[in-house]
Image: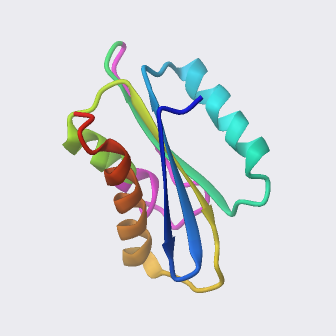
């Protein structure tokens, strides 16, 4: 289903990244439903997407502190020049709080890894 996947472990929290290309709102919803079923015990499923026509962008923090997950993912998408893509990051909390800066760095790192060479 996904075009690319990666993983990051940061202070015992596990971040699983998934890249979806040639997206539509319907394709994004199906992928999100799939991830929710596959990762029922995940703490958060954050994502962001950018669609060219019609132009749409969205960033979702899924109960992470505001602006620490979806916005950093969207920022990576925009900076990479990628279009019609969605990046999902599934997080399993490892018991150690990362703080806002730690969360931004982790979500940015996962998204950057997925989008290298995709722009």
In the image: residue 80, left or right of residue 4? left
Residue 97, position as x, y percentages in the image: 55, 84
Instruction: Count numbered badges in the picture.
Output: 0
Colour mapping: rainbow
**Image quarter in which the C terminus is found:** top left
Residue 57 visible here: no
**Image quarter in which the N terminus is found:** top right
Q: Residue at x 32, y 43 (%)?
A: 115
| Residue numbers of the magenta segment | 54-72
Q: Residue at x 58, y 68 (%)?
A: 14
Q: Is residue 54 above or below residue 12?
A: above
Which residue of the protein is positioned furthest toward the bottom in this rendering? Answer: 96
Q: Is residue 40 above or below residue 86?
A: below
Residue 103 visible here: yes
Q: Nearer the viewer, residue 64 or 117?
A: 117
Residue 30, position as x, y percentages in the image: 66, 26
In the image: residue 53, left or right of residue 61? left
Q: Residue at x 65, y 84 (%)?
A: 95
Q: Is residue 61 above or below residue 100?
A: above
Residue 73, position as x, y percentages in the image: 38, 50
Residue 59 inside the magenta-drawn segment: yes
Q: Residue at x 36, y 14 (%)?
A: 54
Residue 42, position as x, y percentages in the image: 71, 60
Residue 76 inside the magenta-drawn segment: no
In the figure, residue 82 lies in which quadrant? Answer: top left
């Amino acid at each position: 289903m996904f075009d690319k996947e990666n993983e990051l472990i940061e202070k015992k929290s596990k971040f699983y990244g998934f890249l979806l290309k040639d997206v539509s709102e319907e394709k994004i919803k199906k992928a999100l439903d799939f991830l929710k079923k596959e990762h029922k015990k995940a703490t958060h499923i954050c994502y962001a997407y950018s669609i060219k026509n019609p132009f749409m962008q969205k960033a979702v923090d899924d109960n992470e502190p505001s602006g620490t997950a979806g916005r950093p993912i969207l920022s990576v998408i925009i900076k990479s020049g990628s279009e019609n893509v969605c990046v999902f990051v599934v997080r399993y909390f490892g018991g150690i709080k990362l703080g806002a800066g730690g969360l931004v760095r982790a979500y940015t790192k996962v998204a950057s890894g997925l989008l290298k060479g995709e722009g």
